[in-house]
Amino acid sequence: MKLSVGQLLRVYLKRNNMTQSDLAKKAGCSRAMVNHMVSDRKRPGEALAEIVALILSDDKEEEEGLKFFLLQHHKKVHKLLKEYPHAFEDFRTAGNREDDKGLRIY
């Protein structure tokens, strides 16, 4: 099963010890919008994807990869994974934990 935007957002929220409400406040959007993204009912626009990636990422490379993934630019994410493998640990390990068994990006 491929890793969806919502699944990846849940991984990042957990990693950052944040709730959907926390992310909504920091991103300047409604909690309902965050809930729609986490439940894969809506994808963020470019501006919101940039803000969410900035909030949830540890460094610039990870931020860029997360932004592209949120926008569903999988080819760019794949290229960034090859160029900066150390910066995308959450992408690579998302399927290696008990609660995320079987998840993969590609």
Image (cartoon, rainbow, N blue to C red):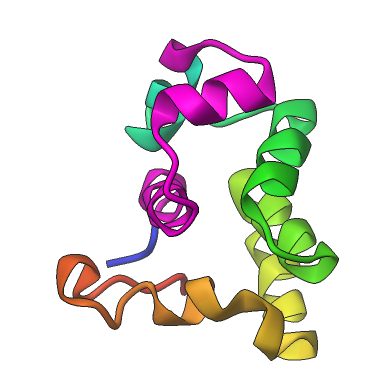
- Above or below residue 52? Residue 41 is above
Going by the image, does 31 lie left or right of 2?
A: right
- Above or below residue 96? Residue 94 is above
Q: Magenta span covers which residues? A: 4-32
Judge by depth and name the residue closer to the eye, 37 or 12.
12
Q: Quadrant of the N terminus?
A: bottom left
Going by the image, does 3 lie left or right of 58?
A: left
Magenta span: chief secondary structure: helix
Extreme residue toward the right, this view: 60
Q: Residue at x 64, y 26 (%)?
A: 26
Judge by depth and name the residue closer to the eye, 44 or 14.
14
The quarter of the picture where residue 82 lies is bottom right
Judge by depth and name the residue closer to the eye, 8 or 57.
57
Residue 21 in view, yes or no: yes
The quarter of the picture where residue 103 lies is bottom left
Q: Is residue 24 magenta?
A: yes
Q: Residue at x 80, y 69 (%)?
A: 61
Tally of marks: 0
The quarter of the picture where residue 86 lies is bottom right
Residue 33 locus on image (x, y percent):
49, 17
- Above or below residue 86? Residue 106 is above
Residue 42 in view, yes or no: no
Residue 73 locus on image (x, y percent):
68, 55
Going by the image, does 29 lie left or right of 87?
A: left
